[in-house]
Amino acid sequence: MEARIRTWPDLESAEPRLLGHAGFKAACMRIASIDDREKTPNFGKQLVSLGTIVVTPPMTIIGIRGYSKDRYGLDSIFDVYAKDLPKDLSRLFETKHNEKSLEKSEKALIHTDELFAIACVIPRHAGLGQKKPFVFEVAVKGGDIQKQFAFLKELLGKEVKVDQVFQKGAEVDVAAITKGKGFEGPIARWGVKKKQHKSRKSVRALGTLGPISPATIMYTVPRAGQRGFHQRIQYNNRIMVMGNSENEEFQINRSGGFKHFGEVRGDFVILRGSIPGTYSRLVKLRAPNRPKLKKIAQPKVLEIMI
C-alpha cells in the first residue's frame, strides 16, 4: 500500500528538476541541535526534538510520461521506457524501447502540457525482504517542455539519489499511509463521552443519532467504522541530517538494528518531528506545496540520541 500524490508545486526556475523521492520509515530518535528559527524564544539555544529516520535507496527513472490538459483533466499521450529495466521490475510489465518511440514522443511535445518521470524504488536496496518494487510518477517542473524532456532523457535508465533532489535544511511534504487500527466504536474513533452507569442498556453507544425530523442520520453524527490506514500528507518536515550509513559523522545504527526494521543501509535522511505510517512502510517525499522557509540554511546538529 502506498500513498498517491495528486498535486505538485509550481516552480519559477529556468532549469528543470525532479520534485519528489521515496523512502522507507525506519526508526525514531532525538536530535540535539541549535535552534536557527529567528524571532522565537529559543533562537540560538540548544533544542532537543524528535526525529524520524527515512531510508532513501536510489530511485531509478524507468520511463517518461506526457500528459495533455483539457477541461476534464489530464490525458496520457505517450510513454517512453528505458532499455534495461531491473529484473524485479521486468516481471511486472513488458515495455519496449526503440528510437522510434523517442522520435514520436518528441513530436508529441507540441500537444504536451505536463511531463512526469516514471520512477521505481526497490525495497531490497533498503535491506527489506519485499521483492516487488514500487512504481510511481514524479513531476518535473522548471523551464519549458523541451528542456524538461531533454532533462528526463538524460536521466532515463539511471539512478537518482536523494541529495540530487533535495538538500539538507530544506522542507519536504511527506505522503504516507497511517497505522491501521481496525474497526472501532465512536468512543475510541471520535472521543465521544461514555454514558452514565446503568443509564441505558449500553454505555459505550451514542445517546441519540439526531432529531426525529428529518428522519435521516446526518454525516456529522459520530459513528463506528474504520480508524487508521488512511492516506495523509504532512506538510513542511525539515531535513535535519542527510547522509550515508557507511561514511557518516553520526553513528546511526544501534547494536542489533532497529525494532521492526533492522539496520539502516545506504542513503538516509532524518526529518524533524514524526511522520505518519508504520516502520518499513513506503513514504513519499515531495517538494513543499506550502513552504514556510524563505531561505534554506544548514541546520546545526550537535548530537543524535538513538
Image: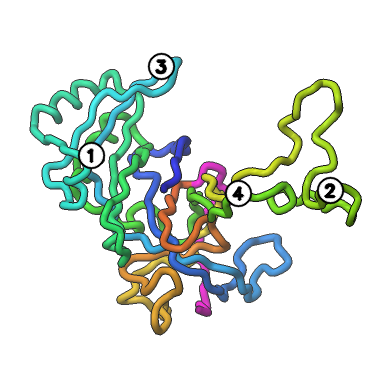
Q: Residues within 10 Å of mark 1 (few under 14, many from 20)?
A: many
Q: Is residue 112 left or right of residue 200?
A: left
Q: Does residue 250 sit above or below 138 in this rendering?
A: below
Q: Which stretch did the figure color magenta?
A: 288-306
**Magenta stretch: residue 72 in it?**
no
User: Which-is-in-front pick, marks 2 and 3?
Assistant: 2
Identify the disc placed on residue 197: none
Front residue of 112/225: it is 225
Front residue of 42/180: it is 180
Q: Are marks 4 and 1 in contact (CB under 8 Å)?
A: no
Q: Is residue 244 left or right of residue 220?
A: left
Q: Are marks 4 and 3 in contact (CB under 8 Å)?
A: no
Which residue is outermost to the top? 71
The disc, 1 or 3, on the residue closer to the chain's N-terminal end is 1
Q: Are marks 2 and 4 in contact (CB under 8 Å)?
A: no
The residues tagged by marks 1 and 3 sit, at their Cα atoms, a distance apart of: 23 Å
Residue that carries the numbered disc 1 in the rendered image: 63
The residues tagged by marks 4 and 1 sit, at their Cα atoms, a distance apart of: 40 Å
Residue that carries the numbered disc 3 in the rendered image: 70
